[in-house]
Image (spheres, grey):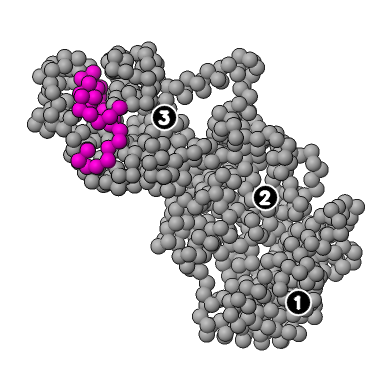
């Protein structure tokens, strides 16, 4: 019986086999690597400092410890393959194959006749397997592994045919050269979606041909990711990088007598350019001019980091978890309730490098995106295929923050909130653990609905690094109608009647008279508006259905005291009419008296039947305060906002107005926030809504 060929045995059992890359010369280094609990050590004769003699010394040192020595030869020339196998290697990896004929030629060079052309005569190789010369001759063809490295565009184009070549055991991915050769290089450690798709195609080709798939990874977190994807043979690290990192950590310990400086570790993990301690960066990740949080300027993060992948986020979280460093997440910076104010300093994770659409599954009506992808940018891409992602909060909002706050927008009446449009999430937990909440099917009854639990958790349970979102067909024949009313109560009463009749419009928005005046004064739209409480209705569907709905809504509006009703005849007019709603916040900000003025944007939601009452009471309260404030609402689902303009001397008045508005909503069986999220501003109101025990 031959001695153990550990890698082949692991692959035969269907196990994921982990190994390391040796680039530095020395049999003692080989022994150290082979003693680390891995299945194989690859001697890199292509890019490493490993010559022929070093290879011959290292192979027996590795094999003696029951670990498989694998050799990557510099080229597929026959003599190079022969020298590697004659050293007693358990397998070879050959770079730069391009075609199936290259693969067949490689197999011929690795096999003894009759399958191949390999010459027989080395007494060294049989000893590595505890075989006689005859035994080695009989066993070698089935015992040794032949691995083809797929790293060129031509090889990628031919990968299915290469995989079917008899005698090829493993298709091995060299992601760096593959990325370079197909035009999607790995820069700053980031694999772009196109490269990930190419790697996935190699994995699928290998498994379709009943072959194994291997890949070179740069660290344990990345190796875990590719294990989860189904790769069979995975490099975890190189001797060079592992030695460098271990020494750096020990020197830090020696110099400081404490754990390594997290800044050093973060820069090693992410690169110098992706870790910032500049005052401008720290201040920019503390608050914003539209946030309602009372920011005093002292609450800033100690540093800001910019990860580029799930694995890098996990690495950051492990560092912070070990050192008990507080973490605040940041993507678009558009939140309104003080969500990203770092009250305990610590570290801010800015996701803006993670802004890609990873995969669009048009037939399945879902899309996989990274957290810094904006909803507007996503819809621009989807529109090219007649598709649509409905949640539409303020301009500039990113998917990560939208999930964190459980937001919605003007389309919520028809399409619901963010909760209805998330299928699954990839999330990094506080200790750096990576989880995926579920698979891609539209429905699943498998266990807890972790996705829903994480939506609205505002970064307290984990950090979203990928999201699989539902999408739908883009609405057809969109039309807009506008109706004005003598009072906010009458306008809200109209909404209550429409909702009560079950009329499914695309959206129903309300703007009060102050808000309409601000829009006129700002000049942000091409139209001058009547400065009265105004409802904006959005319709979509067949032209006949839209016309029928407009007629019904017009009749309801007339019965609830509307003074005017106008509707758009085409999509151009619809866009013009709807533009007033999207300019609401900016028009209030344009009314600031000087740079000392702030805008407090807050929201509540109540059952639709209580909407007229709460809106009128809030309107009267604001009018009595003397502050300028517009009121806006996605009133089809009982949600409305107040935009309060105030300076530092008036902050207490604004705080009291918000306090009464929130208490009023809770008293009417409503919620302290319909879509903005809790943040720091609404945190203390949660016990009023849910009770202390909850």
Which image quarter: residue 350?
A: top right
- In percent of width and height, residue 44 lies at 34, 24
- In percent of width and height, residue 328 lies at 66, 41
Q: Is residue 425 left or right of residue 515?
A: left
Disc 3 designates what residue? 236
Give the extent of the magenta segment: 74-103
**Mark-to-mark CA distance, 1 and 3:** 64 Å
Towards the viewer: 566 or 272: 272
Which image quarter: residue 515?
A: bottom right
Residue name at image x 56 percent, y 28 percent: 268
Disc 2 designates what residue? 333
Residue name at image x 52 percent, y 72 percent: 475
Q: Earlier in the sequence, mark 2 or mark 3?
A: 3
Kindly tell me whether residue 358 is visible in this rendering. Answer: yes
Q: Is residue 7 left or right of residue 127?
A: right
Residue 212 belongs to the span the image colors magenta = no
Disc 1 designates what residue? 529
Q: Is residue 557 left or right of residue 377?
A: right
Mark 1, Cα crowd under 10 Å, few <14 / some 14-19 / many 20+, is some
């Amino acid at each position: 019986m031959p001695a153990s060929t550990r890698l082949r045995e692991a692959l035969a059992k269907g196990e994921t086999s982990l190994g390391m890359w040796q680039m530095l010369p020395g049999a003692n280094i080989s022994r150290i690597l082979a003693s680390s609990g891995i299945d194989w050590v690859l001697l890199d004769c292509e890019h490493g400092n490993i010559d022929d003699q070093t290879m011959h010394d290292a192979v027996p040192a590795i094999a003696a410890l029951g670990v498989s020595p694998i050799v990557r030869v510099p080229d597929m020339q026959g003599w190079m393959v022969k020298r590697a196998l004659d050293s007693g290697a358990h397998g070879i990896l050959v770079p730069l194959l391009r075609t199936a004929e290259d693969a067949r030629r490689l197999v011929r060079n690795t096999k003894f006749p009759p399958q191949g052309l390999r010459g027989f005569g080395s007494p060294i190789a049989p000893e590595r397997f505890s075989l006689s010369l005859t035994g080695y001759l009989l066993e070698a063809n089935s015992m040794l592994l032949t691995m083809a490295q797929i790293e060129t565009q031509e090889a990628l184009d031919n990968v299915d045919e290469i995989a079917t070549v008899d005698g090829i055991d493993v298709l091995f991915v060299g992601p760096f050269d593959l990325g370079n050769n197909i035009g999607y290089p790995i820069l700053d450690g980031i694999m772009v979606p196109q490269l990930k798709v190419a790697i996935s195609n190699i994995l699928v080709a290998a498994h379709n041909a009943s072959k194994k798939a291997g890949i070179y990874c740069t660290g344990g977190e990345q190796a875990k990711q590719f294990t989860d994807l189904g790769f069979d043979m995975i490099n975890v690290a190189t001797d060079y990088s592992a030695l460098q990192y271990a020494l750096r950590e020990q020197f830090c310990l020696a110099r400081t007598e404490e754990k390594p400086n997290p800044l050093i570790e973060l820069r090693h993990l992410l690169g110098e350019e992706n870790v910032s301690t500049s005052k401008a960066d720290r201040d920019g990740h503390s608050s914003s001019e539209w946030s309602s949080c009372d920011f005093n300027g002292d609450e800033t993060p100690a540093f800001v980091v910019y990860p580029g992948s799930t694995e890098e986020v996990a690495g950051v979280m492990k560092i912070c978890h070990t050192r008990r460093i507080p973490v605040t997440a940041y993507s678009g910076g558009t939140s309104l309730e003080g969500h990203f104010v770092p009250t305990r300093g610590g570290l801010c994770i800015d996701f803006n490098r993670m802004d890609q659409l990873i995969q669009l599954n048009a037939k399945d009506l879902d899309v996989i995106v990274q957290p810094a992808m904006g909803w507007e940018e996503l819809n621009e891409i989807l529109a090219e295929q007649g598709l649509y992602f409905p949640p539409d909060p303020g301009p500039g909002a990113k998917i990560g923050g939208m999930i964190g706050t459980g937001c919605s927008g003007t389309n919520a009446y028809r399409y619901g909130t963010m909760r209805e449009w998330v299928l699954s999430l990839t999330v990094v937990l506080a200790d750096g653990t990576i989880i995926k909440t579920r698979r891609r099917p539209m429905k699943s009854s498998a266990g807890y609905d972790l996705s829903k639990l994480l939506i609205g958790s505002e970064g307290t349970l984990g950090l979203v690094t990928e999201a699989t979102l539902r999408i739908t067909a883009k609405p057809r024949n969109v039309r807009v109608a506008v109706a004005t009313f003598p009072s906010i109560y009458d306008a809200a009463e109209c909404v209550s009647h429409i909702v009560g009749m079950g009329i499914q419009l695309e959206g129903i928005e309300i703007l009060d008279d102050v808000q309409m005046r601000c829009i006129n004064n700002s000049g942000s739209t091409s139209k001058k508006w009547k400065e009265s409480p105004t409802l904006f209705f959005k319709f979509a569907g067949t032209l006949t259905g839209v016309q029928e709905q407009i007629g019904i809504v017009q009749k309801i509006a007339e019965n609830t005291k509307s003074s005017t009703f106008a509707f758009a005849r085409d999509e151009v007019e619809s866009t013009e009419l709807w533009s007033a709603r999207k300019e609401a916040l900016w028009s209030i900000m344009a009314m600031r008296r000087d740079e000392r003025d702030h805008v407090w944007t807050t929201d509540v939601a109540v059952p639709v039947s209580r909407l007229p009452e709460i809106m009128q009471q809030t309107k009267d309260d604001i009018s009595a305060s003397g502050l300028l404030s517009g009121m806006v609402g996605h009133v089809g689902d009982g949600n409305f906002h107040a935009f309060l303009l105030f300076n530092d001397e008036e902050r207490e008045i604004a705080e009291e107005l918000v306090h009464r508005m929130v208490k009023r909503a809770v008293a009417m069986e409503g919620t302290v926030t319909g879509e903005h999220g809790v943040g720091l501003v609404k945190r203390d109101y949660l016990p009023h809504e849910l009770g202390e025990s909850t």
